[in-house]
Amino acid sequence: MSESTPLVLGIETSCDETGVGIVHGTELLVDAVASSVEEHARFGGVVPEVASRAHLEAMVPTIERACREAGVALADLDGIAVTSGPGLAGALMVGVASAKALSLALGVPLYGVNHLASHVAVDIVEHGPLPEPTMALLVSGGHSSLLLVPDVTHDIRSLGASIDDAAGEAFDKVARVLGLPFPGGPHIDRAAQVGQITIDFPRGLTSGRDMERHRFDFSFSGLKTAVSRWVEQQQRDGRDLPVADVAASFQEAVVDVLTRKAVLACTEHDVAALQVGGGVAANSRLRAMAQERCEAAGIALRVPRPGLCTDNGAMVASLGAQMMLKARPVSALDLPADSSMPVTDVQSGLPVTVDHDHPH
Ligand code: KG4
Ligand code: ZN
């Protein structure tokens, strides 16, 4: 492949999806995903050891499937990218070890990348180059973050995050209270479509004082408790549970806060584009309200298609390709799997820069 348009394979194993994607520059060739979500369903959440084992079993077949579907031989690849964090330690290790082996065997550069940065970079294969800067709202089962992104390959700043449950986690927990299966987000979304917003649930961290101290942070545990109390009261009163109405009212409270703070972050930081990513970005009400509020504020909204919002390998390949296109340094082969990798570290395995004037 030509040097100017790198062919990159990306591997994602931070949670329960074994994702292998191949990107040619900014063009997505394939996005192969094997999910172990069904193995976790009866536990009501992802079981780390089960996820790691599933990655180990799925890794080679998923790489083979990706190459076959893209019509790409491993020898054609110009680079390998892998999620090195944040995520489940054992799960990350499977992806990182596989990526190192591929990089070493093929003699191509390796890029250890941040999972959250990858969620932002995936939109490049869908909607073209990211405006610089872009504001990113990342909402999934593991994270709820507002990020200011001057350059997705090396400069990401965190404006705020959830101080308790992630947005998707709140969807999953409330779904359980309503007797809906795991993962609950899509079930709440569907139920809400036939429900009415009849209950005014609390909007966390939006009061005057909270907006001073936690301007771009989120909190969903109070909302989750409010829903549980409301449901318990109905049961005590011997009334039927209006599942669709509770789902619609809960969803409205989450989506209202997410979009309100995201638009405020854009206007206050003078950023003209908002990207929404992560599993919860598949939510139909979130997509509609973000569209409405961005339009009113003159902000360009970018939301990848739902399949690219949830965890996948294409997002990792997309970020790796950007790093190659922008001639970012290669990661060292001993790069770590870092379960608590900060979002501001876009890449792992970079040489430690020593300030010779101030060595300590
Ligand atoms: O990004 P993702 O696949 O994995 C993580 O990194 O967590 O996100 C999964 C989360 C789950 O909590 C799931 O309930 C939620 O995304 N989700 C949704 C919808 N589809 C998936 N939440 C609300 N509405 C949806 N339509
Ligand atoms: Zn994710």
Image: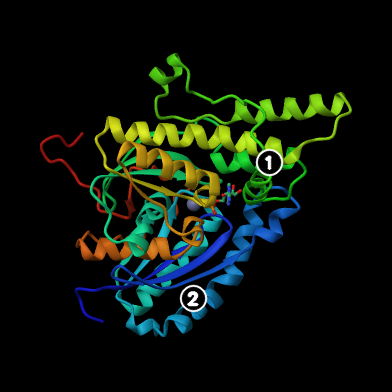
Q: Position of residue 148 (x, y in %)?
A: 31, 40
Which sits in the foreground, 21 or 96?
21
Q: Earlier in the sequence, mark 2 or mark 1?
A: 2
Judged left or right of residue 287, residue 23 is left
Front-most of residues 284 and 71 = 284
Can residue 168 be seen? yes
Give x and y (percent) for residue 202: 59, 24
Q: Is residue 323 left or right of residue 226?
A: left
Q: As drawn, is 104 to the left or to the right of 235?
A: left
User: How far across and down, in percent of the image, does residue 35 sit?
Assistant: 60, 64
Q: Residues within 10 Å of mark 2 (few under 14, many from 20)?
A: many
- Density class for disc 1 (Cα within 10 Å; few <14, some 14-19, many ≥20) is some
Quarter of the picture holding the N terminus = bottom left
Under circle 2, the secondary element is: helix
Task: Decide which of 186, 117 is in the foreground and name it.
Answer: 186
- The residue lying at 74 percent from left, 47 percent from top is 180
In which quadrant of the rendered image does the C terminus lie? Answer: top left
* Distance in Å between CA atoms under marks 2 and 1: 42 Å
The label number, if any, that marks residue 63 in the structure image: 2
Left or right for 202, reference 342 = right
Residue drawn at x 52%, y 79% as measured from the top left: 65
Secondary structure under the numbered disc 1 in the rendered image: loop
- The spot of residue 327 in percent (x, y) is 19, 62
Which picture quadrant has residue 253?
top right
> Which kind of residue does numbered mark 1 sit on?
Gly
Residue shown at the point (64%, 46%) measured from the top left: 193
Q: Which residue is mark 1?
A: 195
| Mark 2 residue type | Ile
| Residue at the image point whose x is 36% and y is 60% from the top | 334
Numbered disc total: 2
Foreground pick, 259 / 344: 259
Whether residue 88 appears in this view of the structure is: no
